[in-house]
Image (cartoon, grey):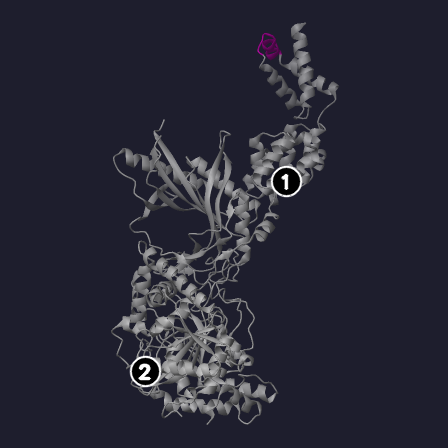
């Protein structure tokens, strides 16, 4: 079936004119229509636009043009601005917001000839680990619809896992690509901070946000990253460094690769989860890699550090949503203060408000040093820990999440427990490092992910290590029942 | 004598004369229809990012070098968070802990000719806010974001000024400097150059500063002087009548000539400054600084010192002539035409007739009706005794209104000086004959009547008698008789 083919195979068939982009697009739109109601993975579907995109891709293909993503459908997380199509960020605040421009990620993928099927559901303003904070309702996990798909890019993850799209974009601020990728059994890549432009990505925490990709294999993710990556003069934090050929780097033998096992991550880890990682390490050793233990002593501080830095930045980033120029405005404001307080009070959901208040608090006079400044210092220590570790090893390995997908509603009333979902992923964001999550087995019939994190700009090495694992295993080929 | 000492510090906002805004590509031209020079970045649309304008940095460095300050190799942009409709992001990007320029100074000359050094704590780059519009809008406030994002250099002085006059002298000096450097047009009506004044008083001899009030947004030298004078009187009166000054922000009402409380310290915003994660620290290397240094023009103090020395002018005259680069250039052009030996004549004319005509018609020296070459032509006729200084003033007025060269006017109006001794003697004889009483009084010792006779001869010759010759001849005639 078309939806089980990887991006390379689809591009090959499009190139050979065995299928058209229109046929491919119809196929996925048909699956979405049939299967999405049980998942709620989308906020906006754009079937007409998709057909137009597909027709124009077919014209280019007929004219002899070729490209690794030409004519391939995708979905964008609804955090990326799309010219003329609503960008809601999962929030009532932006329910009516239609961006007048394309995010750089969107523009690059459009220029590569992709076909946008729609925009995926997400935690409100990317704040959440379960996709339950969305104004548009929770996304359900295709492996078990009573379970969450993870968050914040839950819609992109669920749709990729359910074969509703060959791939999807996402963003990762504290694990928002890797955690849902793990919980839905797909491959999720968060590139190095600065590798992919943030222009047009509605900011949550600017120093942590990074755009990335959900795909069903590391090879597919490589092809997509190739298009997304690169310097953008519109984003001062994007890095002007050459983009290697990621697909060409796949296939390099792993002999001599040093993989570090993070001691701190395995203390108290549930046995079945730890077992999956041990199995993965065996595979890596059989592929010629060396595994050794490394320590990142400050890593246990990553969750509290993150929950100071990220809310601080979000409290400022979200100030622009004031009911004045765009987005939700309360009815009949009686004065300016009323306009602000009611527009924001009514437009934002509970988790967003919690983080704005936390962030406002930690930046306030008298608390700044104790919270924000201290968190920045710890952040530097964590970055230094990683640097020291990468002097000894090429990559570090850990589970992506402590547990498989949990029940919808199970953690919504306990934010601290919810926040601890990101305990394995946050470190890479604080240090700006690339990380990938890939399927490595099942616990309670739910997929689990392993995470590889590498030094800055080591995406090629990271993706190859993930690819080699996927050549030796078939976890990433498993489809949830009903979505095969 | 008052027993109080005033302490004043100024925060001057100079709008930098860049073509585009500090963080976006929008134009900065003044006077465009509302919101026509505001792009998505200025409007703070979701997803947009700031990109620093290198030209604004160059201008800030230029200023730093001109005041002998330290230009920071690394400075940081911070967010100043507060809600206001003319501040679209809900924060202003400014520099807080690490400004681009620190620890400079300049000297000002006071009315009594003494020179005083004023310290400049820092100068930092920031963006301006938009404007709220109230006129012609019923029950609503309009927002014009054309000014939002315009680059400002905020120049913060040490509390080194001790009177309103000193504050004005300092502000004028900065005004002169930024125009010399061509980094600000200095247009105060359009708000390109404005200041906040921190004012406090303390008993003479006490070291500790009194509590200060900050007077916001003063946009003329006259308002600065009057507002500070009012504020000093208010504070002294308050303290002397048993009250205490509270730290607060005050507004100056120029119609009523008074300052009024705007908000107290307790009501002041907690701006929650933190480094802007969208902008990397600003790094300036020595090569850049030296390249900027090479573009520095002759600075006002250097120029004034050179004028005083080269042209034997008083420090005061040299200072006045160097108050603007254009006036100094005009003067130098005239001097080169009439010869350095007549520099004092040129200085008197540029500071006298020319400046009053410019002031009267409210035009810049650059658009003077009498060009420097034309004034040179006029002064040459004084130098070669074709006309007297007095007649020259008449010629100047005609030049100003008719726009013709001096020679043409002298000829057309027959203003050529009478230098024929015989002709002058004849007039003197007639005047003496017609005024026997005055002659007798003069002879009796009323020396002052000499002027009367000069006046009568001038009247009879329509002012054209060569003054030096007239004096000599008249003296001989009057005294000759007297001592005969």
* Whether residue B176 is visible: yes
Give the x, y percent position of residue B172: 50, 40
Counting from the top left corner in percent of width and height, residue B462 is at 66, 26
- SS for dot 1: helix
Labels 2 and 1 within one chain: no
What secondary structure predominates along the stretch shown in magenta?
helix
Q: Which residue is mark 1?
A: B330
Q: Quadrant of residue A425?
A: bottom left
Question: The magenta stretch spans which residues?
Answer: B436-446
Residue nearest the viewer, comparing B431 with A26: A26
Q: Quadrant of residue A42?
A: bottom left
Which chain is mark 1 on?
B
The crowd level at tag 1 (other Cα within 10 Å; few <14, some 14-19, many 20+) is: many
> Contact, CB < 8 Å: mark 2 with mark 1?
no
Seen in the picture, residue B88 relative to A279 is either above or below; the reply is: above
Q: Is residue A149 visible?
A: no
Task: Identify which residue, B372 or B89, lies in the foreground.
Answer: B89
Q: Does B438 appear in magenta?
A: yes
Between residues B219 and B111, which one lies in front from this camera angle?
A: B111
Left or right for B106, reference A281: right
Q: Chain of mark 2?
A: A
Where is mark 2, residue-wise?
A: A272
- Residue A80's quadrant in the figure? bottom left
The percent coordinates of residue B319 (x first, y second) are 56, 35
Question: Where is the C terminus of chain B found, in terms of image quarters?
Answer: top right
């Amino acid at each position: 079936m078309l939806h089980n083919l990887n991006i390379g195979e689809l591009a090959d068939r499009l190139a050979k004119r065995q299928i058209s982009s229109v046929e491919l697009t119809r196929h996925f739109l048909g699956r979405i229509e049939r299967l999405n109601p049980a998942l709620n993975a989308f906020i906006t579907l754009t079937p007409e636009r998709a057909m137009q995109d597909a027709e124009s891709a077919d014209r280019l293909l007929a004219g002899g043009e070729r490209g690794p993503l030409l004519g391939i459908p995708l979905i964008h997380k609804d955090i990326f601005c799309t010219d003329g199509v609503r960008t809601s960020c999962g929030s009532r605040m932006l329910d009516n917001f239609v961006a007048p421009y394309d995010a750089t990620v969107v523009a690059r993928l459009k220029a590569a000839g992709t076909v946008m099927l729609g925009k995926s559901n997400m935690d409100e303003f990317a704040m959440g680990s379960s996709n339950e904070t969305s104004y548009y309702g929770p996304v359900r996990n295709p492996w078990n619809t009573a379970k969450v798909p993870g968050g914040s890019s839950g819609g992109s993850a669920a749709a990729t896992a359910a074969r509703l799209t060959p791939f999807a974009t996402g963003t990762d601020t504290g694990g928002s690509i890797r955690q849902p990728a793990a919980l839905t059994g797909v491959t999720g890549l968060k590139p190095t901070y600065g590798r992919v432009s943030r222009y047009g990505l509605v900011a949550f925490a600017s120093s942590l946000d990074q755009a990335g990709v959900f795909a069903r294999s590391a090879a597919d993710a490589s092809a997509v990253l190739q298009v997304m990556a690169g310097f953008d003069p519109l984003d001062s934090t994007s890095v002007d460094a050459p983009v290697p050929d990621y697909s060409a780097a796949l296939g390099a033998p792993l002999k001599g690769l040093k993989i570090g096992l993070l001691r701190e991550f395995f203390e108290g880890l549930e046995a079945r989860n730890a077992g999956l990682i041990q199995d993965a390490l065996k595979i890596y050793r059989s592929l010629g890699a060396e595994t050794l233990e490394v320590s990142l002593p400050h890593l246990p501080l990553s969750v509290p550090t993150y929950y100071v830095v990220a809310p601080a930045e979000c409290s400022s980033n979200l100030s622009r949503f004031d009911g004045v120029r765009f987005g939700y405005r309360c009815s009949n404001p009686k004065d300016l203060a009323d306009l602000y307080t009611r527009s924001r009070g009514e437009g934002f959901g509970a988790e967003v408000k919690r983080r704005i208040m936390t962030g406002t608090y930690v930046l306030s006079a008298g608390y700044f040093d104790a919270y924000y400044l201290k968190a920045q210092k710890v952040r530097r220590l964590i970055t230094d820990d990683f640097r020291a570790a990468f002097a000894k090893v090429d990559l570090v390995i850990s589970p992506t999440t402590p547990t498989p997908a949990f029940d919808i509603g199970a953690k919504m009333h306990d934010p601290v427990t919810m926040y601890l979902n990101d305990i394995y992923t946050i470190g890479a964001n604080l240090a700006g490092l690339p990380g990938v999550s890939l399927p490595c087995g099942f616990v309670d019939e739910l997929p689990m992910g392993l995470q590889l994190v590498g030094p800055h700009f080591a995406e090629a090495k990271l993706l190859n290590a993930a690819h080699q694992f996927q050549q030796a295993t078939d976890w990433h080929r498993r489809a949830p029942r009903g979505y095969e | 004598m008052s027993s109080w000492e005033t302490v004043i510090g100024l925060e001057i906002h100079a709008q930098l004369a860049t073509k585009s805004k500090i963080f976006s590509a929008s134009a900065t031209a003044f006077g465009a229809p509302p919101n026509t020079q505001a792009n998505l970045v200025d409007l703070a649309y979701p997803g947009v990012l700031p990109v620093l304008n290198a030209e604004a940095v160059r201008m800030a460095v230029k200023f730093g070098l001109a005041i002998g300050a330290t230009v920071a190799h690394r400075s940081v942009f911070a967010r100043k968070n507060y809600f206001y409709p003319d501040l679209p992001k809900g924060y202003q990007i400014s520099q807080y802990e690490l400004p681009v320029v620190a620890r400079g100074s300049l000297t000002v000359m006071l009315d009594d000719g003494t020179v005083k050094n004023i310290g400049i704590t820092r100068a930092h780059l920031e963006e301006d806010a938009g404007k709220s519009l109230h006129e012609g809008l019923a029950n609503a406030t309009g927002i014009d974001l054309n000014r939002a994002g315009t680059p400002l250099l905020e120049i913060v002085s040490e509390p080194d000024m001790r009177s309103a006059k000193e504050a004005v002298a300092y502000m004028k000096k900065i005004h002169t400097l930024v125009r010399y450097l061509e980094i600000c047009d200095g247009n105060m009506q359009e708000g390109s150059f404005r200041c906040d004044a921190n004012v406090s008083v303390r008993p003479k001899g006490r070291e500790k500063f009194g509590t200060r009030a900050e007077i916001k947004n003063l946009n003329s030298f006259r308002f600065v002087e009057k507002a500070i004078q009012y504020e000093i009187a208010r504070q002294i009166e308050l303290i002397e009548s048993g009250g205490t000054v509270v730290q607060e922000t005050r507004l100056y009402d120029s119609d009523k000539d008074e300052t009024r409380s705007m908000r107290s310290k307790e009501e002041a915003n907690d701006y929650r400054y933190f480094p802007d994660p969208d902008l990397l620290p600003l790094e300036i290397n020595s090569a850049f600084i030296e390249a900027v240094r090479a573009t520095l023009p002759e600075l006002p103090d250097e120029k004034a010192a050179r004028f005083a020395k080269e042209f034997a002018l008083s420090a005061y005259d040299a200072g006045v002539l160097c108050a603007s680069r254009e006036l100094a250039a005009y003067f130098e052009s005239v001097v080169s035409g009439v010869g350095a030996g007549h520099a004092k004549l040129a200085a008197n004319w540029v500071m006298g007739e020319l400046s009053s005509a410019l002031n009267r018609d409210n035009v810049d020296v650059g658009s003077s009706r009498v060009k420097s070459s034309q004034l040179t032509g006029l002064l040459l006729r004084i130098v070669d005794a074709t006309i007297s200084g007095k007649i020259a003033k008449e010629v100047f007025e005609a030049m100003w209104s008719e726009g013709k060269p001096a020679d043409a006017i002298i000829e057309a109006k027959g203003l050529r000086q009478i230098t024929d001794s015989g002709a002058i003697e004849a007039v003197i004889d007639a005047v003496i004959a017609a005024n026997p009483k005055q002659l007798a009084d003069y002879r009796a010792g009323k020396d002052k009547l000499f002027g009367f006779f000069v006046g009568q001869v001038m009247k009879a010759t329509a002012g054209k008698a060569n003054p030096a010759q007239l004096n000599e001849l008249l003296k001989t005639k009057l005294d000759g008789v007297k001592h005969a």
